[in-house]
């Protein structure tokens, strides 16, 4: 049984009777059990998957209508709610939290007969980019288990990359889908803000974050986007995309497209091998008929500072609900007054979340807001204007997804600012609401490098077409696990 197939191939194979869902899911579960001790992608494995597979096989046999996923194994980042299953956000604070409802994306995938093989690891509350801030221990990069898999959707990227599932859903607030996708050599996509409902995604910085798929191919991303995108009455920030079909015309190509190469995303601190991979990607885009030209967007320099100021502020407010009264763990209230009770409760949050909440309390506070929070909002609007102007000239913008290679576990954990700076190429798409995708492009010293393409709002279809064109020029080795 070949577990290394794409989502579209899986659907085809099940439809034509080439494989049974039970066999595929059975082998997938065996494989998960074999590799998990090395990788730790999963926080919880769904042991009912095989029963779900049998139910779908029965439906197929009896000629009943089957949803378009045909029992495809999908993993879900553990900050997205699946009814009656634990949703911990990789935090001790939510260790025993069982979601009472399905996120909209889950409901849509269930309707299409996807099988959820498990909940996957993340940095606590999606804050981080290495999965090292998970309260349940880090995930490991399948390309080299001494290195981080990226984050915060590290478990998602590892599970797809190591063939523990065919696709995964993550969330991207500042790069959390694209960064681990780049580090683990899979496709990672953040849609235009509002294209996918956030209902049932546990908020970190809700004004800029989106759920996004991680897959083996760009076509698989388009396939999933067809299922999970669209307006939702439970999330009034969603956009009506008129049931756009992202898979049709995916072979359109990029002949004649103008692509801006963002100067500030290839500057100081970029790894040599990342730089040469990016130059190679530029040549490939040109050989496909695109016209590439450097563009300078000087507000990018301030994007990381603005991003962390805005997201900490939103996190401070979104995480205020973890007061151990509505969510949390049991301990007796006797002997505490209000403040000491909340202080003791919050001790269950890890160091990164605590740091963000402290920053998030300070930067928008009276007397400091003008210097920090309001300034960050100004950067956000200036950056948006610069990007919008760039899109009057260019169809797409391009950069490496991450300026460095996957680093070693433990290497940056005690240096939060060094970690923040790794986000320099990804946060712009979130601050401006634009769609962006990371495509596996190269392997250097056994470690993956991804290329990022960005498009204007609601140009998701054109973005996927371009990504598919670039992807078709790349042939990478398979990961050995
Ligand atoms: N590294 C960024 C942060 O820690 C991005 C996280 C994300 O996209 N969820 O905020």
Image (cartoon, rainbow, N blue to C red):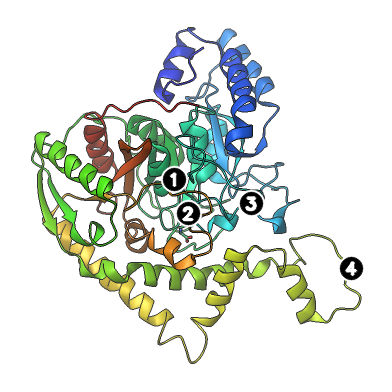
| Res. 129 mark | 2
Local crowd size for mark 1, using a 10 Å CA cut-off: few (<14), some (14–19), many (≥20): many
| First reached walking from the N terminus: tag 1 or tag 3 | 3
The answer to whether the residue labelled 1 contacts the one labelled 2, judged by CB atoms less than 8 Å apart, is: yes
Question: Does residue 26 appear to the left or right of 418 in the view shown?
Answer: right
Please give left or right for residue 268 compared with residue 438 in the image: left
Cα separation between marks 1 and 3: 16 Å
Q: Residues within 10 Å of mark 4 (few under 14, many from 20)?
A: few
Is residue 200 in view from this perspective? yes
- Secondary structure under the numbered disc 1 in the rendered image: helix
Mark seen at residue 120: none
Q: Which of pointers 2 and 3 lies earlier in the amino acid sequence?
A: 3
Between disc 2 and disc 4, the foreground one is 2
Q: For the image shown, how many numbered marks are present on the structure?
A: 4
Q: Secondary structure at mark 4?
A: loop
What is the spatial separation of the Cα atoms under label 2 and label 4, in whole angstroms?
A: 35 Å
- Asked if disc 2 is less than 8 Å from ligand 1, the answer is yes
Instruction: Determine if the C-beta at disc 1 is less than 8 A from ligand 1.
Output: no
Is 90 above or below relative to 215? Answer: below
In the image, the residue with mark 3 has its CB under 8 Å from the nearest atom of ligand 1: no
Pointers 1 and 3 in contact (CB under 8 A)?
A: no
- Residue 90 is labelled as 3
1 or 4: tag closer to the N-terminus: 1
| Front tag of 2 and 3 | 2
In the image, 304 versus 206, the foreground residue is: 304
Give the answer, above or below, for where 149 lies relative to 297: above
Residue under pointer 4: 332
Q: Earlier in the sequence, mark 1 or mark 2?
A: 2
Q: Residue at x 69, y 65 (%)?
A: 322
| Place of residue 479 in the rendered image (x, y in percent of width and height, measured from the top left) | 43, 28
């Amino acid at each position: 049984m070949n577990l290394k197939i794409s989502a579209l191939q899986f659907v085809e194979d099940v439809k034509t009777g080439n494989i049974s869902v039970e066999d595929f899911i059975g082998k997938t579960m065996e494989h998960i059990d074999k590799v998990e001790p090395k990788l730790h992608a999963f926080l919880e494995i769904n042991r009912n998957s095989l029963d779900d597979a049998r139910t779908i096989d029965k439906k197929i046999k009896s000629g009943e209508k089957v949803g378009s996923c045909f029992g495809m194994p999908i993993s879900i980042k553990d900050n997205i709610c699946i009814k009656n299953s634990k949703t911990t956000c990789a935090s001790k604070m939510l260790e025993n939290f069982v979601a009472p409802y399905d996120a909209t994306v889950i409901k849509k995938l269930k309707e299409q007969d996807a099988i959820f093989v498990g909940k996957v690891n993340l940095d606590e509350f999606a804050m981080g980019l290495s999965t090292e801030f998970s309260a349940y221990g880090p995930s490991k990069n399948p390309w080299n288990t001494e290195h981080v898999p990226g984050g915060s959707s590290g478990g998602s990227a590892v599970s797809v990359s190591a063939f523990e599932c065919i696709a995964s859903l993550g969330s991207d607030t500042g790069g959390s889908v694209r960064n681990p996708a780049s580090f683990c050599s899979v496709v990672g996509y953040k849609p235009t803000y509002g294209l996918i409902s956030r209902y049932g995604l546990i908020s970190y910085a809700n004004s800029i974050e989106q759920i996004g798929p991680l897959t083996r191919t760009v076509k698989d991303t388009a396939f999933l986007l067809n299922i999970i995108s669209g307006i939702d009455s439970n999330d009034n920030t969603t956009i009506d995309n008129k049931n756009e079909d992202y898979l049709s015309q995916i072979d359109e190509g990029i002949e004649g497209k103008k692509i801006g190469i963002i100067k500030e995303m290839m500057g100081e601190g970029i790894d040599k091998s990342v730089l040469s991979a990016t130059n190679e990607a530029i040549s490939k885009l040109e050989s496909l008929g695109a016209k590439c030209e450097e563009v300078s967007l000087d507000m990018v320099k301030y994007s990381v500072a603005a991003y962390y100021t805005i997201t900490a502020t939103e996190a401070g407010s979104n995480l205020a609900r973890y007061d151990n009264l509505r969510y949390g763990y049991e301990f007796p209230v006797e002997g505490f007054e209000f403040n000491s009770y909340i202080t003791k409760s919050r001790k269950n949050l890890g160091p990164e979340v605590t740091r963000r909440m402290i920053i998030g309390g300070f930067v928008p506070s009276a007397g400091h807001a003008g210097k920090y929070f309001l300034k960050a909002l100004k950067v956000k609007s200036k950056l948006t204007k610069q990007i919008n102007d760039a899109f009057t000239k260019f169809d797409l913008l391009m950069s490496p997804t991450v300026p460095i290679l996957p680093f070693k576990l433990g290497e940056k954990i005690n240096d939060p600012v060094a970690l923040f700076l790794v986000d320099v190429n990804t946060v712009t798409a979130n601050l401006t609401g634009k769609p962006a995708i990371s495509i596996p492009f190269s392997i250097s010293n056994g470690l993956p490098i991804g290329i990022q393409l960005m498009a204007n709002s609601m140009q998701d279809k054109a973005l996927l077409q371009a990504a598919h064109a670039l992807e078709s020029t790349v042939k990478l080795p398979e990961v050995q696990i």
